[in-house]
Image: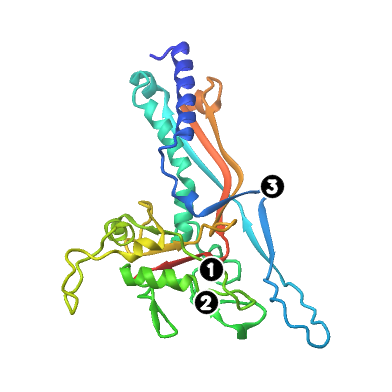
Amino acid sequence: MITPAGFNLFISTVNTMIGQVYSDASLPEFWKNYCSVIPSTGSQNVYGWTGMLPKPRVWKGSRVVVQANPQTYTLVNLPYEHTLGIDRFHLDDDLMGIYYRQIPDQARQVRRLPDYWTRDLLENSGDQTGTRQNGLDGLTAFNTAHPINLYAPAVGTYSNDFTGGGQTINGTLIGGAFSPTAFATLAEYSMTLKGEDNEPLGVYFDKYMFPAALKLESELVMKSMFFAPPAWGTITGQVGAADNPLKRFGAEPIINPYLTSNTKWYGFDTTKSFKPLVWQEREPAVFTPRVNENDPLVFDTHHYAWGVWGRVTPGWAYSFLFARSGP
């Protein structure tokens, strides 16, 4: 049977192991590649921004007064919990063996929450469905008809959704199932996106995220120095594989095993001061043990419990900073 001294050692060791999990740099955190961490001081954040001002004009006649249009986006924090129970009798009989692993595993699961919830936001699943799919312009964040200017529909639209085999824009099929052509067309299309002033926004997808099922294909296309044997034609002097120009796009592939779709892939522009998605944090994870002998749970049911809670949420940034593609 566990003694008071042994139990105190167990608690102390567990607390140390939880701290080690949170400081373990080897645990992959994919969400940090494409999320800006934004603190929150209330139940929600209201993000405000203004549309892009037009460019200067040649001064002919009287001045033309322009005004920026205010826009807002509200992101409500979501509370979460995770509770691990341990039967006191099992702990007594186990002599602190397997339970040394269970509580650090709880900490790992909590640390993975941003990857789980941002995955759900990208894939329209879990608790990130419904109105949470709406982006800054009021449309679903992935959409084929985002307005370039909310207050001037005639300016036109742009797409950041190239699933369903891709989108034909100005006679060119953009994106679709992952391939060298799908990758190249999506990368090139991102550079053509324009703002309200009809000038290029300077978007370039520098990171692409893939499910584990596309690891081989994505790394072959994006990382190989040489790509494929050239077709024989009038040039007969070349031997071996051709130089891979797609590697020179300078984009980084990210293999995210948490993605559940085996075919959808994503492009992100992470070069700006604001990343494509938001991870809003009101209260980070709080670990609370219920282990006192006079605690009602322990006294009445001979169970110890480790509970975690916090308030956070994922959200969208500008929809031109990200895109998805797939068959």
Label 1 sits on residue: 320
Image quarter (top left, top right, bottom left or bottom right) of the C terminus: bottom left
The crowding category of the residue bearing disc 2, from other C-alpha atoms within 10 Å (few below 14, some 14 to 19, many at least 20), is: some
Residue 321 is left or right of residue 255, and the answer is right
Q: In the image shown, does 70 or 12 lie closer to the viewer?
A: 70
Q: Nearer the viewer, residue 39 or 110?
A: 39
Q: Position of residue 290 (x, y in %)?
A: 53, 27
Q: Earlier in the sequence, mark 1 or mark 3?
A: 3
Q: Is residue 127 above or below residue 104?
A: below
Report the residue marked by disc 2: 158
SS under mark 3 = loop
Q: Position of residue 86 (x, y in %)?
A: 42, 29
Question: Where is the N terminus found, in terms of image quarters?
Answer: top left
Q: CA distance from mark 2 to mark 1?
A: 8 Å
Q: Amino acid at mark 1?
A: Phe
Q: In the current view of this chain or complex, which residue is farthest to the bottom?
A: 61
Which tag is nearer the camera, tag 1 or tag 3? 1
Q: Please tell me whether mark 2 sits on a helix, a strand or a loop.
A: strand
The amino acid pointed to by label 3 is Thr
